[in-house]
Image (cartoon, rainbow, N blue to C red):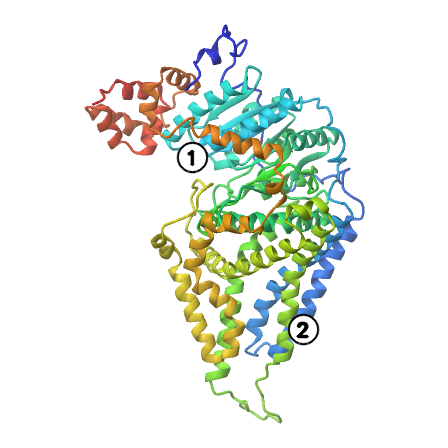
Amino acid sequence: MAVPLDTLTRPATAPGMLPGRLAALPPEVPLDMPVQDLRARPPRARRPDTAPRGMAWRRLFVFGAAILLTIFGTREMALVLDVTTPLTPGVVVLVLFVPLFAWIALSFVSSLCGAVSTALGGGRGLGIDPEAPLPALTGRTALLMPVYNEDPRRVLAGLEAMEAALREAGAADAFDIFILSDTTDPDAWAREEDAFLALRARAGERARIFYRRRAKNTDRKAGNIADWVRRFGGAYPQFLILDADSVMSAEALIRLAAAMEAHPGVGLIQSLPVIVNGRSLFARMQQFAGRLYGPVIAHGIAFWHGAEGNYWGHNAMIRTAAFAEAAGLPHLPGRKPFGGTIMSHDFVEAALMRRQGWAIHFIPALQGSYEESPPALSDLAIRDRRWCQGNLQHMAVLPTRGLHPVSRSHLLVGIGSYITAPLWLLFLLAGVLLALQARFVLPVYFPQGPALFPNWPVVDPVRAKWVFIGTMGLLLVPKLLAWGAMLLNGPWRRGHGGGLRALVSMVVETVLAGLLAPVTMLTQSVDVFSILRGRDSGWSAQTRDDGSLPMGQVARLYWRHTAFGLAFGVAAFLVSPYLAAWMSPVVVGLALAIPLAAWTAKRGAGQGLRRAGLLLIPEERDPPSILSRTLALRAEWEALAPEGEALARLRADPALLSAHRAMLPPPGPARPNALDASLVMGRARVAAAGSAEEALAALTRAEKAALLADPAGLDALLALPVR
């Protein structure tokens, strides 16, 4: 199935081949990308021309209202616990309550603004009008697809669908596609090359699709992108990064590129990716919540972010010059997990670009941006562990000089999204311990020393009930606002199955999410404590399709959650059956962690609710053409680039072997101190082996990859006899 190397290296003579010479990579046009000094004060940043009016008043309202709600909630909670002095036992619970309630209050006020903005048709900006004719483009845009040990078939199916859509829109000549591989698995690397050649052949003679693999994964994804900028960035005014599970419509790509061309002071434009293609119950919950509540939340943050928006790492258009000037990431001082490479680089890159005066905009009203969700709770936990470490690293970035206050708030929000988990856990534990003390420890009514009145332990149950109702209201009202906004939009309402089905779906999602929330809380709490103890999360490929696991494996992952939930429930019941009833959502969620994790990962459960008309999203009832095309191409690509061992694949396909040799980077200058231990050990093992099978059994994955990347090592492997 591989395309002959002639297609890449010499003038074509047969129909369907590319005319002229087409290499695996275009000529390099280097662009300097200096590493930023976080301790140096940058020049005073200019105010972006594209900043909306009245941003100071908007931010004053959002943060002021959140602070007022927090003050009111804190006062009520203090009255509930009868906290009168810092020595009152309930003060610990109150101290934990304040940041948790403030977090909820800020989200509530932001969502309230988002509901109003959605109803008024806001969230556009930069002249992007989804209803207007497509604009003409004058420059070239690079679409970057970083991959790391992924199944190339699903990745390249999405790229093929996007390239075909751009060609139909008459804009394919304005976009170049780069597959930027950081793959370390040699078998996956050979599959990537095989699939790349197939994509070249399928896309036709005019498609500009390129492939590059780095032998060393320096600085992970951020280093992958920085390598492209430094080698090829000078040829492209802007670029867009895709995730391995994301696709974008031609209309969205063209409008983003045109907006970047029209506003030279804008450094980044973030679109709102919609989660799609969920099959398991867990994935369908995620995509329903994202599709129904997401627009209200997104319009809310766009309302007060203005030109100081954030960046989520993909599906965003980036000005190459701005990125190169401002976003060269340094290594953080100290050891892992806090030192070294910045893992959650996107937040930091946006903050540094804004520090240099570039505008960062979020346009939630732009349609046509899609991604996928992890299929199971266990897969989300793996991704969350890496994100948790990356966001906690931002504590070392917060002191960076010259950051805009809103950029600092983005970093704080990222940190808070994980710190709130152990705070919630400690809040629950402190509350139960306080109740246990009141139940089993004899109170001291008259303290030592003269006292006129006894010190009665007082808890106000009526006020506690209203504090609980108010807190739940702050959590649930944004969902009701999103449901109300959906009712006002006919296509949106029909896409969710109608108002009644959407309401039932919202109840199902809320109940299941409420049961899973304490499981995630405990997992994230363990992650935070593990990271604070110095354990690194590493870098692993993400599961994209099937998240189901054998019940025994699920039990090994979640038995501690179950044990903790049962112990927590017993402690609450010892205090009072009424306290146990109040704590039941947390207790039940933890106690049922194993069956919940297993059941929500099943496709059958998700598809059953879909057949019942629940958890529907508009993209399922009326799929956009880019999604339909991507899914159809995935089915075609199942027959292409099958799994297999790399050396056997190269032996069996001389054309692929020739292309593999041609795509190897030229050897760098010899340096006495630069010794590749994997290559040296690999050569030694090959020299000692009597057959290819014996050598492959002895080689580690890193040694095999090093040999395949070295012409002499590759020749040595191919020279071994096959038994």
Q: Which quadrant of the structure image shows residue 641?
A: top left
Q: At numbered mark 1, what does the secondary structure look like: helix, strand or loop?
A: loop
Q: Which mark is residue 187?
A: none
Q: Amino acid at mark 1?
A: Asn
Above or below, 550 relative to 185? below
The 10 Å Cα crowd at callout 2, few under 14, some 14 to 19, many 20 or more, is some
Give the image location of residue 406, x and y in percent: 68, 49
* Nearer to the camera, 302 or 477: 477
Residue at 75% x, 56% y is 60
Give the image location of residue 68, x and y in percent: 72, 65
Q: Amino acid at mark 2?
A: Arg
Give the image location of residue 495, x and y in percent: 65, 45
Determine the CA span between mark 1 and mark 2: 52 Å
Q: Which mark is residue 149?
A: 1
Is 25 situated left or right of 263 in this image? Answer: left
* Nearer to the camera, 526 or 483: 483
Query: Which tag, 1 or 2, sits closer to the chain's start?
Result: 2
Q: Residue furthest right?
A: 53
Give the image location of residue 29, x and y in percent: 58, 20
Is 551 situated left or right of 94 in this image? Answer: left
Above or below, 145 relative to 336? above
Q: At numbered mark 2, what does the secondary structure look like: helix, strand or loop?
A: helix
The 10 Å Cα crowd at callout 1, few under 14, some 14 to 19, many 20 or more, is some
Residue at 53% x, 39% y is 330
Above or below, 723 relative to 375? above
Q: Is residue 336 visible?
A: yes
Q: Which residue is mark 2?
A: 75
Is 560 situated left or right of 465 in this image? Answer: left
